[in-house]
Image (spheres, rainbow, N blue to C red):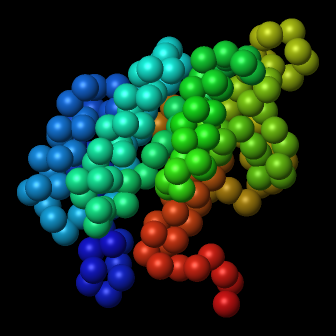
């Protein structure tokens, strides 16, 4: 929020790259030093969580905590990595859970990208079916991703989703991520979550 009438000012791509590049943390510091009006920072992953070690994620968490300590008036939003087709128990699921557990244990703000990709709007769960960020999944347990939950839902619910051309995924998943982001921005802006 820019402070003028509680309106949102989103500066997408204010800094280059993503969390996989070592300069994200000093770049964040430099950006915040030049832009003291900024009160929320969120960085996203590309494929790094898919191959990350526990120590790699610990470094991310430690750097974020350092930013929070040094910029107490800024809300830092943590993020999980996108689904990549790995089965349960593999790196992406373990490292995403590491991020979730840290956020829960330390009362941090989390935009759970992988969780959004795991469920269709009816609450059906796909992360245990080798799901990807494109919503492809293994429908019959033979380890081959042969279906797409977003396409199936879109086909069964015409008019209940909108075309939005999201990167690396289906329109419905883009819709769900947008709804989650707007909910997050509203909560950060002071909305208590009630419908009153």
State whether residue 47 appears in this view: no
Q: Which is more toward the observer, 48 or 131?
A: 48
Q: Residue at x 37, y 60 (%)?
A: 75
The picture quadrant where one finds residue 8 is bottom left
The picture quadrant where one finds residue 189 is bottom left
Q: Which is more toward the observer, 71 or 44?
A: 71
Q: Measuring from the top left, give residue 112's x and y in whole percent.
A: 58, 45
Q: Measuring from the top left, give residue 191's x and y in whole percent.
A: 53, 79
State whether residue 39 appears in this view: yes
Q: Quadrant of the C terminus?
A: bottom right
How many circles with numbers are drawn on the protein?
0
Report the residue that reaches farthest toward the left: 34
Query: In the shown orientation, is residue 95 left or right of residue 86?
Result: left
Query: In the shown orientation, is residue 10 left or right of residue 128?
Result: left
Query: In the shown orientation, is residue 36 left or right of residue 21?
Result: left
Query: In the shown orientation, is residue 72 left or right of residue 142?
Result: left
Q: Which is more toward the observer, 108 or 182?
A: 108
Q: Quadrant of the N terminus?
A: bottom left
Report the residue that reaches farthest toward the bottom: 196
Q: Residue at x 9, y 57 (%)?
A: 34
Q: Measuring from the top left, give residue 135's x and y in whole percent.
A: 68, 32
Q: Measuring from the top left, give residue 124's x and y in whole percent.
A: 84, 43
Q: Residue at x 56, y 66 (%)?
A: 183
Q: Residue at x 88, y 15 (%)?
A: 141
Q: Examine the rendered structure and indicate whether residue 97 appears above or below residue 107.
A: above
């Amino acid at each position: 929020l820019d402070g003028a009438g509680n309106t949102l000012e989103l500066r997408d791509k204010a800094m280059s790259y993503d969390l996989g590049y070592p300069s994200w943390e000093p770049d964040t510091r430099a950006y915040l030093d030049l832009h003291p009006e900024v009160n929320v920072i969120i960085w996203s992953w590309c494929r790094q969580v898919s191959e990350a070690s526990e120590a790699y994620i610990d470094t991310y968490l430690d750097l974020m905590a350092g930013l929070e300590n040094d910029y107490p008036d800024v809300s830092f939003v943590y993020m999980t990595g996108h689904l990549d087709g790995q089965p349960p128990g593999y790196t992406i699921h373990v490292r995403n859970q590491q991020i979730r557990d840290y956020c829960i244990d330390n009362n941090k703000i989390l935009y759970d990208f992988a969780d959004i990709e795991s469920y269709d709007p009816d609450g059906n769960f796909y992360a245990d079916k080798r799901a990807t960020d494109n919503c492809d999944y293994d429908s019959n347990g033979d380890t081959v991703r042969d279906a797409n939950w977003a396409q199936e839902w879109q086909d069964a619910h015409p008019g209940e989703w909108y075309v939005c051309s999201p990167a690396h995924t289906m329109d419905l998943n883009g819709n769900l991520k947008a709804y989650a982001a707007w909910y997050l921005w509203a909560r950060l802006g002071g909305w208590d979550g009630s419908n009153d």
